[in-house]
Amino acid sequence: MHRFDPPRRAFAAALAALAGFVDALGFLLAGGYFVSFMSGNTTRLAVDIATDPRSAVLPAGLIALFVAGVFTGGVAAFKAGTARKPAVLALVTALLVAAAVLHRAGLAGPAIAALVFAMGALNNTFQRGGEVAIGLTYMTGALVKIGQGLAARMTGQGGSGWASYLGLWCGLASGALAGALAWSRWEAGALWLAAGWAAAMIIVALRLPAER
């Protein structure tokens, strides 16, 4: 994260906020399951298998859809070449619009599926060497980096990059708060806000300075 220039770090934080916003909406829409946080769904899967195996189908399906989204986003990123960021975000925007339309039509299940697929695809926005360089929908790694950075700073070993990871975590947390507040006011209508946010990020991606 700290190896990226300031505009890209800010861009990553804005995308993490979008992920938090969508995850909060999805969490409320799906009744306590996640559309971007697959560690949580994995725990739910294990608990459901142990306590109510029939209900394990839902978290298993969400995890599979997320992986499918990552796969599809990865293919789109590869084919787009240097236009990877706007291409991935265009895919994410289309999926969020689809989720809003599906929910409006009374198809809550397919809407949730579109949200999960979108969040999987989103993680392909930042790549280096064909691998994800910044995880935008999961923050455990970022929190570990914060702790390690603070420890390194206290022991005189550097650790200057921890603030970048803190910004990423704050982005997701603030986005989730905004998503919960938007849901309390507009409920699933807030999905249109998420789609508009993603569309705005395409414009930002196109205006980013060239990588050095």
Image (cartoon, rainbow, N blue to C red):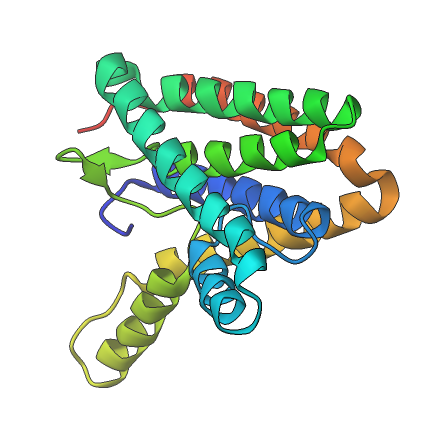
Locate residue 89: give its quadrant: top left
Q: Residue furthest toward the front?
A: 54
Q: Residue at x 62, y 30 (%)?
A: 110
Q: Residue furthest toward the left?
A: 129
Q: Is residue 102 visible?
A: yes
Locate residue 139: give its quadrant: bottom left
**Front in this rendered view, residue 179 or 76:** 76
Q: Position of residue 135 (x, y in %)?
A: 35, 48
Q: How many marks?
A: 0
Q: Residue furthest toward the bottom?
A: 155
Q: Is residue 163 visible?
A: no
Q: Residue at x 28, y 28 (%)?
A: 74
Does 176 appear above or below 157? above
**Front in this rendered view, residue 197 or 66:** 66
Q: Position of residue 22 (x, y in %)?
A: 60, 42
Q: Is residue 198 left or right of residue 210?
A: right
Q: Residue at x 24, y 69 (%)?
A: 159
Q: Residue furthest toward the right?
A: 185
Q: Position of residue 7 (x, y in %)?
A: 38, 36
Q: Position of residue 37 (x, y in %)?
A: 48, 54
**Front in this rendered view, residue 74 or 125:** 74
Quarter in which the C terminus is drawn: top left
Does 43 appear above or below 76? below
Does 171 appear above or below 104? below
